[in-house]
Image (cartoon, rainbow, N blue to C red):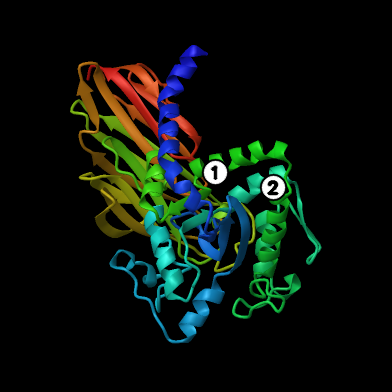
Amino acid sequence: MVTTFQSELPTLRTWLDAAGKLLPFLPAMLGIGTPAHYLVEVLDSTELRPTGGFIGNYGIATFSGGRLTSARITDVVLLDHPYALKGQRIPYPPAYSWFPNYLAWESWSFRDSNLDADFPTAARYGELNYQREGGNVPVLGVIAITPALIQQALAITGPIYVPEYQETVTAQNLVSLIHFHQLGGRAAGEGSSYIPSPDGHSSERKRFMELLAEHFLARVQQLSSSAMPQFLHVLTNALRTKDVEVYFDAGGAENVLQLLHLDGTIQSPPGDHLFIVDTNVSPNKANSFIVTTVNDQVTIDEQGNAVHRTTISYAWTLPGRDYGVHLYRDYVRVYAPSGSTLSAQDGWHPRGASTAFGCQVWEGFFSLIYGQTLTITLVWTSYSVAKKDANGWHYQYLLQRQAGAQRMLKVQVMLPLRANVTAKLGGFVSSGTHAAILTESWDKDLSVGLDYHGG
C-alpha cells in the first residue's frame, strides 16, 4: 500500500498544483457574478471526424452562480444553411485544402470546423465559424461530447423516456434510436433539417434528439447526492478517454488542462510517439460497424533509433444500417516524431507528407465496402528516441487515442539482441529477455516504455 501511494505521489502533486492554478479562474468559468456561456458540440462518432465525430448538433450551456442553469441543443444545419442561402462563403484554411476534394467543396462551415485532431485548434475554429454564421452568444470556450459519454451516464440515470415519441432510450439503443428518428424516413417521422420544428425543438429532422437531451438533462439534475460521486467519476474518466473535450478561451485555465494532459492537443514529446487520425468523408454512419486494429512492430537498434512496421486494418464486417452512401471513404493522417522517415507504404492512396504540431505527418486515402477488409502498412523510422544515461537505456512511447475511434492496439518492441529489459512501464509485458508486448483496447492515450541495459 505504501509503495502504491508513493508511486501515485507525482500524479497527486500535479493535480494539486493544477487545482491551485485553476482557482483564480473558477468564479468566471462557473458564472459567479456574470453568467458564463459555452459552445457545446454534440459529436456523432459513427461518422468519425478528427475530434471525435461529425458535429450534427450544437448548443449553448450556461452556468450561473456555480450551477448549470440551461443547456439546449439544436440542429447544426439551422445555423449553417441560412448563412449559405445568403450566398456567403467561408474559405478553407490552407491546412484543410484536402477536405473540399471529398465533401462541402463550396464553403467551409461550423459543422466541418473540427478537421484537426488538435482540440484547441478545432475549438477555436468552431467558435470562429459559429460567430461568422451568425451565432451571437459570447462564449468562454467549447465543450464537445461523444455518444459514449451519454451511454455511460445512462448507466447512472437509468433509461430516459421520451413521451413525445413514446420511446425509452437506454445505453444500448441510444445511437440507433437517434439515427432512426433523424434518418429513418417517413416511417420514423423524419422531416427536414432546413425547417425548424413548429414547437421550437430544433429542426423537424432532429426534434427527437433535442427532446431527448432535454429529458436527459432534467434527469441528471434530479440525481440524488449519493449518485453524484459516480456521475463525477464518469465525467473525469470521459476527459481521459476524450469522450468529453473542453477548451477555455482564458489562457490560464487552458494551461491547467495542458498541465494535466487533458487539453486534447496533438503532442510531440521528446521520445517516440504515434497518432492515427481517421476522417470519414463518405458521408455515412459506418464507423460503428468497422473493426479497426492497429499492430505496431517496433525494432530498436543500437543507436536508439526505432524502425516501425505499422499496420492499420479496417474490417467492415459488423451488420447494421449505415444511413448514407454504401461506400466508406476515409482520409487518414499519421503523426510521428519530427524528422521521421517513411520507407514503405501500402494499402492507401498516398496524399503527401507535411509537418504540423511539431510532428511529421503522412496522409492517405482509401475506400471500403461492406464485407471488405483493408490493411494499410507503413514502414517508418524515428531517430534517437531511445536515450542512454548512467542508468542505461530508456525508451518512451506515447500512443495518442483519437476521440470517438474504436480500435484494438497491439505493440511489440524488440530491443537489440544483447539488451536486457530492466523495467516495463505502462502495461508492457515481457516477451523474452529483450522484447515486450502490449495488447489492449485503445480507449485512451497510452504512455508506455522500457528501461534496458546493453545494446
Relative to 388, 116 lies left or right: right
What residue type is disc 1 on? Ala
User: Image point 47% across, 81% down: which residue?
Assistant: 83
Q: Can residue 113 be seen in this view?
A: no
- Residue 199's x, y, as percent? 72, 76
- Of the 4 image quadrants, the one containing the C terminus is top left
Which of these two is toward me, 83 or 206?
Answer: 83
Q: Which of marks 1 and 2 is nearer the N terminus?
A: 2
- Residue 337's x, y, as percent? 26, 43
Judge the density around disc 1: few (<14), some (14-19), many (≥20) Cα neighbours within 10 Å: some
Which of these two is toward me, 192 or 440?
Answer: 192
Query: Which residue position holds label 2?
Result: 154
What residue type is disc 2 on? Leu
- Residue 104's x, y, as percent? 43, 74
User: Image point 70% across, 50% down: which residue?
Assistant: 221
Q: Which residue lies furthest to the top in this view?
A: 2
What number is the disc on residue 238?
1
Q: In the picture shown, does residue 208 fall above or below 430? A: below
- Residue 358's x, y, as percent? 26, 48
User: Image point 59% across, 38% down: which residue?
Assistant: 233
Q: At numbered mark 1, what does the secondary structure look like: helix, strand or loop?
A: helix
Q: In the picture shown, does residue 266 fall above or below 271? A: below
User: Image point 57% across, 59% down: which residue?
Assistant: 62
Judge the density around disc 2: few (<14), some (14-19), many (≥20) Cα neighbours within 10 Å: many
> Which quarter of the figure has residue 382?
top left
Q: Is residue 133 visible?
A: yes
